[in-house]
Amino acid sequence: MKLISWNVNGVRAVNKKGFLKWLEDADPHILCLQETKAHVEQLPGELLEGHGYHTYWHSGEKRGYSGVATYCKEEALFVQEGLGIDIFDREGRVLITEHPNFLLYNIYFPNGQRDQERLQYKLDFYDELLPIINEQVESGNNVIVTGDWNTAHHPIDLARPKDNVKNSGFMPIERDRLDTYVENGWVDTFRIFHPEGDRYSWWTYRFGARERNVGWRIDYFFVNEGFSDQVLDGDIHQEIMGSDHCPISLEVED
């Protein structure tokens, strides 16, 4: 089973750049989108039907901001919009779908760059999510958590680590949160297969960063440790254009 996650930085914008053709060619069983920046009533019908997928959407209260969507070839057994925590849910950041072998959390994690208040909001989000997913694992569920995590975990995960230690996205306090996830048994699936550097999933639009591969790896598929032996592959697809992020993929046993 192939899963793909992609921060599209506006689903209507990426749709004008060949999104549906890419979806047909990539042919994932499940696709998770972040930063859709649209309410369902604003979307053209071609994004909602006629492509062979069931679609689920969680949009924020603010139009043109945040939002996530999950496309599934097989109808999800259960769908939940949000974590059940209003301060996060009103920004449209989480979709939870249940599938025969796992629960899938499609998440657009907060960005902490604006100010100290938003950095704390981001840290609180990490802190609130962890016990929720831990409880699911303790209850016997396999869990996949994917999306734009908005943090590069290790120096290998960005091109300019020394220049960014004071910038949100690579601050020690943020990276410590990801350390805590790993300590709780969560596995970064890409690193199972790819120990090498220079593999990134996001590049600023400025300074020709993508052409020079001056990027950050901030998009992940994490799984609970007990599920990691069913992971067959994980990859980043840097050749796919259309957003400042590129798609990432995960293959698991069906």
Image (spheres, grey):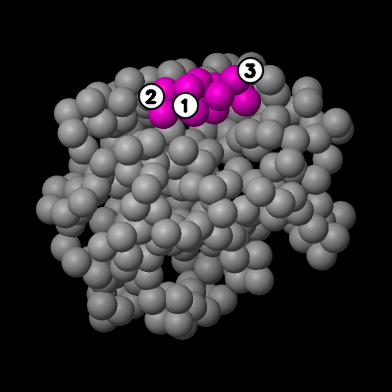
* Residue found at x 21% / y 38%: 141
Image x and y of residue 224, in percent: 36, 37
Task: Decide if residue 173 is on the left or right side of residue 207.
Answer: left
Q: How many marks?
A: 3
Image x and y of residue 112, in percent: 61, 28
Q: Which residue is mark 1?
A: 181
Image x and y of residue 175, in percent: 62, 25
Which stretch did the figure color magenta? 174-185
Q: CA distance from mark 2 to mark 3?
A: 16 Å
**Where 146 sits versus 170, above or below?**
below
Q: Which residue is mark 3?
A: 173
* Residue density around tag 3, few if under 14, some if 14–19, many if 20 or more, within 10 Å: few
Q: CA distance from mark 2 to mark 1?
A: 7 Å
* Residue density around tag 2, few if under 14, some if 14–19, many if 20 or more, within 10 Å: some
* Residue found at x 16% / y 54%: 100
Q: Which residue is mark 2?
A: 130
Give yes or no for contact between labels 3 and 1 (Cβ–Cβ under 8 Å). Answer: no
Q: Nearer the viewer, mark 2 or mark 1?
A: 1
Look at label 2 and name its amino acid: Leu
Quadrant the C terminus occupies: bottom left
* Residue found at x 37% / y 70%: 28
